[in-house]
Amino acid sequence: MISVHLVLFLIFGAVCVAGAINLLAQSHPINSALSLVVVMGALAVEYLLLGAEFVAAVQVIVYAGAIMVLFVFVIMLLNAGTEERTKGGSYVAMIVGIPGMLAGSALVAWVLLTHSGTKSVVAGALPGSPAQVAPLLFHEFLLPFEVTSILVLVAIMGAVVLASHPNSDPKKEKT
């Protein structure tokens, strides 16, 4: 008998995959960013179904919330229009990309099936409460956490520099 959790897991897994495919198929960057929000939301529901409430909350708050706001802000700051598609590039991407994706997927599936060594676990049985995650995040992995935040800040500053127009200086316009 199929459980409700399994059906919901498969439904939201399909929503996640459909959102990812839509993210790649869109030509306008805002639509791609909104598709990424759908993927992040579906992943949060997947985490909830697996019993990882803290990770689901972090997924919604940090990724679907804060990071996506930054993405949309940078996209709008750059005033990015629709993507120009070339005819030659799509053929090369199909010839190289699709077989590469299939080979990579087969390799990942083979490694997971043969070398995982894990047994089935009841959802929510593994440790992962905020009290256990906090020391890892703020003591053992503090440097990578802070480096990531600095990289996001540098990326935003780079977008601002790229978006600034060379004729925006009032002194240059008068001369």
Image (cartoon, helix red, strand yellow):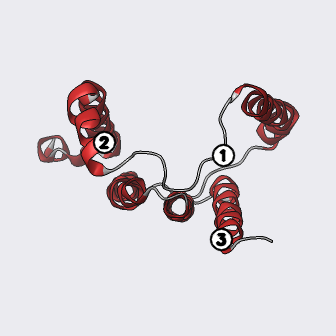
Looking at numbered disc 1 in the image, what kind of residue is underneath it? Ser
Q: Which label lies toward us, 1 or 2?
A: 1
Instruction: Indicate which disc residue 8 carries.
Output: 3
Q: Is residue 165 visible to us here?
A: no
Q: Residues within 10 Å of mark 3 (few under 14, many from 20)?
A: some
Q: Quadrant of residue 134?
A: top left
Q: Which residue is mark 2?
A: 133
Q: Picture quarter containing residue 167?
A: top left
Describe residue 105's horizontal placement relative to residue 61 as left or right: right
- Residue at position x 77%, y 70% in the image: 2
Residue occupying the point 37% across, 60% down: 57
Task: Look at the image and tell me whether residue 129 can be seen.
Answer: yes
Q: Quadrant of residue 53?
A: bottom left
Judged left or right of residue 98, residue 167 is: left
The amino acid beneath tag 3 is Leu
User: Which residue is tagged 1?
Assistant: 120
